[in-house]
Image (cartoon, helix red, strand yellow):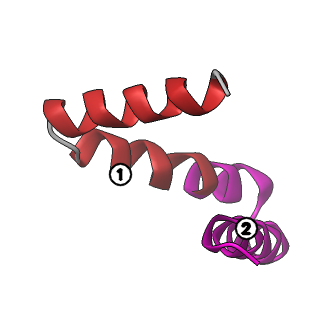
Amino acid sequence: MSMNAKVAIGGVAVGIVLLWLLPFWAALLVIVGVPVGAYLLLDSSQRRRLRRVNRKELGR
């Protein structure tokens, strides 16, 4: 199993646990807020690199 698949499975598991433990709106806030916060912490060159990599993968 690839590393990306393991990360995706872990993310889904954490999302299900959050939905079970917290009210829906709080779980949704955490599930959406953590990736957005991580993206905003990147500097501009890292954001450019991330966008370029994502476009390359879409063009496969």
Number of callouts: 2
User: Is 49 one of the magenta-colored residues?
Assistant: no
Tell me which amino acid carries mark 2: Ala
Dot 2 falls on a residue whose secondary structure is helix
Residue 38 tag number: 1
Tell me which amino acid carries mark 1: Ala
- Is residue 36 depicted above or below 2 in this figure? above
Q: Residue at x 52, y 27 (%)?
A: 56
Q: Magenta segment, principal secondary structure?
A: helix
Q: Residue at x 78, y 75 (%)?
A: 13
Q: Residue at x 39, y 26 (%)?
A: 52
Q: Residue at x 29, y 34 (%)?
A: 49
Query: In the rendered structure, which disc, 2 or 1, sits on the residue that comes first in sequence?
Result: 2
Identify the image quadrant of the N terminus. bottom right
User: Is 7 one of the magenta-colored residues?
Assistant: yes
Identify the residue position indicated by label 2 in the image: 5
Asked whether 10 or 14 is in front, the reply is 10
User: Residue 6 occupies which quadrant of the picture?
Assistant: bottom right
Is 6 on the left or on the right of 38, as rendered? right
Rendered location of residue 41, percent (x, y): 23, 47
| Front tag of 2 and 1 | 2
- Is residue 23 depicted above or below 14 in this figure? above
Rendered location of residue 60, percent (x, y): 67, 28
Is 25 on the left or on the right of 41, as rendered? right
User: Residue 27 occupies which quadrant of the picture?
Assistant: bottom right
Which residues, given as a range, are shown in magenta?
A: 1-30
Dot 1 falls on a residue whose secondary structure is helix
